[in-house]
Amino acid sequence: MAYLAAAMIITGVALFVAAPLGGGLFPWRQKSSSEVDRERLEHERGLAVQGLRELEFDREMGKLSESDYASLHAALEQRALGAMAALERFRADPARGKGSVRRIESARGAAGAPRVVPRAINFCPQCGARCAADSRFCGECGVGLRPRDHDRAS
């Protein structure tokens, strides 16, 4: 009886440890295309925000000139804001959000100077947290937020 219990425990532990190799504990539960698209958008946002953090660190360490920093920062900020906006659209309507993934992928492959687009959604460029429309500083990390283009006109 003790050998049977020990064998069952060893078998259970072996199956639990080997589960990730065979597709996880629930191999029949596959991700839908909308879940894959959402994860791709979140990954894209995370990469862009992390890139902005590393870029800021490199500038503070003196590894980048101001002109290099400005061009790289504009491109990374555009990439992060595009992914965040697509993620917001996807969360609002997952069926409509599928086109956003394709637009981000096509924009990513297009070579050229980054375009300046007025921000419709307020996000912190440092940490990626959502900010109120009238915020001057991020509520999460405290970094100063630049005024948007239409805010400067008034």
Image (cartoon, rainbow, N blue to C red):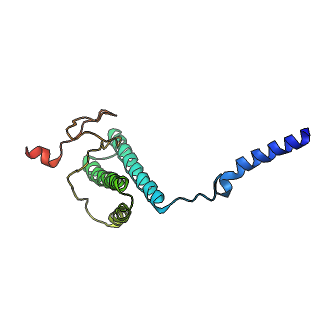
Query: Residue 15 at x, y = what percent?
Result: 74, 50
Residue nearer the viewer, 62 or 34? 34
- The N terminus - image quarter: top right
| Apparent side of residue 19 relative to residue 6 in the rendered image (left or right) | left
Query: Residue 78 at x, y = what percent?
Result: 29, 54
Toward the left, the furthest residue is: 154
Q: How many marks?
A: 0
Task: Residue at 47%, 57% (x, y): give it.
Answer: 35
| Apparent side of residue 68 relative to residue 34 in the rendered image (left or right) | left
Above or below, 151 relative to 143: below
Residue nearer the viewer, 32 or 86? 32
- The C terminus - image quarter: top left
Quadrant position of residue 145: top left
Task: Residue at 32%, 46% (x, y): give it.
Answer: 64
Task: Residue at 31%, 53% (x, y): give it.
Answer: 85
Above or below, 125 relative to 44: above
Query: Residue 92 at x, y = what percent?
Result: 34, 53
Query: Residue 44 at x, y = what percent?
Result: 40, 54
Quadrant position of residue 144: top left
Residue nearer the viewer, 51 or 129? 129
Residue nearer the viewer, 4 or 18? 4
